């Protein structure tokens, strides 16, 4: 069976990413007690990839502050996305006529992923999420933790994103 160069590239990147995560020292993500007893994470070392710059280009689609570090932009878009505590993106949909969607690989912290009409799913370091094209969803940090994931844009035809309404404080505050 013959595989395309893009398929081989994606497989090699996935293998390299898994190796990097497996070798990453866990002490870099130790939680520390805050002044009121809650647990917080240091922003010095939130995983194996750079935190990036404040995500001003997409700030209007987020509640709170996020940071974006593009990792790969040729062939397949892969970025490291960091969310401050309570930060989340708006409901949104990744569209494609064929293929498309998104993959999330959680590298640090604790957060949430929710599809429209379903219960929110807690995400922790090592969790993965496959989001097919056409699925309305949001993702972001827990109220007491930074949250970092690798976002992989699944290649497809006629891809686009529709950014929708914010996840309200009322919706978000119902999470445990």
Image: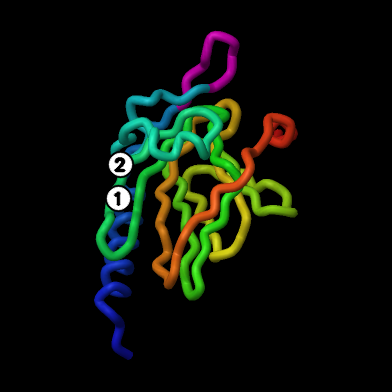
- Residue identifier under label 2: 49
Residue at position x 56%, y 56% in the image: 93
Mark 1, Cα crowd under 10 Å, few <14 / some 14-19 / many 20+, is: some
- Any mark on residue 176, and which? none
- Residue identifier under label 1: 20
Q: Nearer the viewer, residue 44 or 161?
A: 161
Q: Nearer the viewer, residue 166 or 127?
A: 166
Between marks 1 and 2 in the image, the one whose residue lies nearer the viewer:
2
Q: Is residue 1 left or right of residue 30?
A: left
Residue at position x 34%, y 54% in the image: 78
Q: Is residue 110 visible?
A: no
Looking at the rendering, the stretch of residues picked out in magenta corresponds to: 31-39
Return the residue found at the far top: 35
> Is residue 35 found inside the magenta-colored segment of the image?
yes
What is the spatial separation of the Cα atoms under label 1 and label 2, in whole angstroms?
9 Å
Residue at position x 52%, y 63% in the image: 95
Task: Please tell me whether mark 1 sits on a helix, a strand or a loop.
Answer: helix
Quick check: 77 above or below 29?
Answer: below
Q: Position of residue 166 (x, y in %)?
A: 62, 39
Q: Is residue 29 visible?
A: yes
Q: Is residue 36 left or right of residue 116?
A: left
Task: Please tell me whether mark 2 sits on a helix, a strand or a loop.
Answer: loop
Quick check: 102 above or below 126?
Answer: below
Return the residue found at the far bottom: 1
Q: Is residue 72 left or right of residue 122?
A: left
Quick check: 99 above or below 135?
Answer: below
Q: Position of residue 7 (x, y in %)?
A: 32, 74
Residue at position x 44%, y 33% in the image: 66
């Amino acid at each position: 069976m013959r595989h395309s160069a893009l398929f081989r590239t994606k497989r090699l990147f996935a293998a390299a990413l898994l190796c990097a995560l497996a070798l990453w020292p866990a002490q870099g993500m130790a939680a520390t007690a805050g002044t009121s007893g809650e647990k917080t994470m240091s922003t010095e070392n939130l995983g194996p990839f750079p935190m990036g710059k404040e995500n001003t280009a997409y700030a209007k689609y987020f509640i709170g502050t996020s940071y974006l570090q593009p990792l790969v932009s040729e062939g397949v878009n892969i970025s490291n996305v960091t969310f401050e505590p309570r930060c989340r993106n708006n409901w949104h949909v990744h569209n494609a006529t064929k293929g498309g969607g998104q993959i999330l690989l959680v590298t640090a912290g604790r957060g949430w992923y929710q599809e429209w009409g379903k219960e929110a799913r807690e995400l922790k370091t090592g969790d993965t999420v496959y989001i097919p094209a056409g699925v309305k969803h949001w993702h972001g940090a827990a109220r007491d933790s930074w949250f970092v994931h690798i976002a992989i844009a699944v290649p497809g035809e006629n891809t686009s994103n529709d950014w929708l309404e914010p996840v309200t404080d009322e919706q978000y505050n119902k999470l445990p």
